């Protein structure tokens, strides 16, 4: 089991954002997390990646508890993510944005960084090479030296994805990666995610509202509503689940 979430809860000011949620995902698998807005999906991602500390429950990564560990330590273990709102750094080129994900993994000592000694320069050359490989993987090599705000939204999403995969994570978490994409870009994104899984073999967790993405990519789907697990199953099982339909659409009154 790559990621094993056991009865995790998180409260904010007495409000239960996540309550007793359990979820599992294997390496090579794609698991989607869906639910209405405010259901607690992104909070769960923040708990896994170390932004928040759970109030209860366990989060095991490769069998090792990671709840409460700092973000950089979890990232070094092999957890990488994107965010619902694109978080590319202004003032840095696309390739420099991708390279930032490798800074914490470079391992050169502080004096080398401050004085730009040979060890730091060697590490930067290697990081640039790895960043260009990641950009090539997502079809962005021709935009390496551009500023992110100059790019269309769909290409900014791909640049963020390149930054997430450059460290070759074991678990890739994508928070609404298809948001803002047009229909043709969604098709290309679905194809790309499948190719990445096949090539690198990492496990993938996706938060997504576009059911086209969920249905075509997911091995398993978990549904959260009001912070609690509502349902889990295959995409087909979830599509036919009446509780899930009610959560999204509300009660439908029968005609008289």
Image (tube, rainbow, N blue to C red):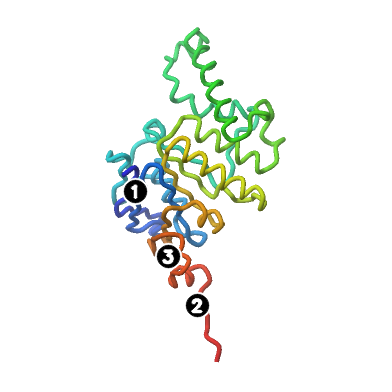
Q: CA distance from mark 3 to mark 2?
A: 19 Å
SS at mark 2? loop
- Please identify the quadrant where the N terminus is shown: top left
Residue at point 30% right, 43% down? Answer: 60
Q: Earlier in the sequence, mark 3 or mark 1?
A: 1
Mark 2: few/some/many CA within 10 Å (<14, 14-19, 20+) = few
- Residue hosting label 1: 54
Residue at point 43% right, 24% down? Answer: 105
- Residue hosting label 2: 251
- Residue hosting label 3: 237
Residue at point 46% right, 60% down? Answer: 235
Mark 3 vs mark 2: give the one in front.
3
Q: Quadrant of residue 134?
A: top right
Residue at point 64% right, 50% down? Answer: 180
Where is residue 253 shown, x and y percent of the image? 52, 83
Q: CA distance from mark 2 to mark 1?
A: 33 Å
Mark 2 vs mark 1: give the one in front.
2
The residue lying furthest to the top in this view is: 118
């Amino acid at each position: 089991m790559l990621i094993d979430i056991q009865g995790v809860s998180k409260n904010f000011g007495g409000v239960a954002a996540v309550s007793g949620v359990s979820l599992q995902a294997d390496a090579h698998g794609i698991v989607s997390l869906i639910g209405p807005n405010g259901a607690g999906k992104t909070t769960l991602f923040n708990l896994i990646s170390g932004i928040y500390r759970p109030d209860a429950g366990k989060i095991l990564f490769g069998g090792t508890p990671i709840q409460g560990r700092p973000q950089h330590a979890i990232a070094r273990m092999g957890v990488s993510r994107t965010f619902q709102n694109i978080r590319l750094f202004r003032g840095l080129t696309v390739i420099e944005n991708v390279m930032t994900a490798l800074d914490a993994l470079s391992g050169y000592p502080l004096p080398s960084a401050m004085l730009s000694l040979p060890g730091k320069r060697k590490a930067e050359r290697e990081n640039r090479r790895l960043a260009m490989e990641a950009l090539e993987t997502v079809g962005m090599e021709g935009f390496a030296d551009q500023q992110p705000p100059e790019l269309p939204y769909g290409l900014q999403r791909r640049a963020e994805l390149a930054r997430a995969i450059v460290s070759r994570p074991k678990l890739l978490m994508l928070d609404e990666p298809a948001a803002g994409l047009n229909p043709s870009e969604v098709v290309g994104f679905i194809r790309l995610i499948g190719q990445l899984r096949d090539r690198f073999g990492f496990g993938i967790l996706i938060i997504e509202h576009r059911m086209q993405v969920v249905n075509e990519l997911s091995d398993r789907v978990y549904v959260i509503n009001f912070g609690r697990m509502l349902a889990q199953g295959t995409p087909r099982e979830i599509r036919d689940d009446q509780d899930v339909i009610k959560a999204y659409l509300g009660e439908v009154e029968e005609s008289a």
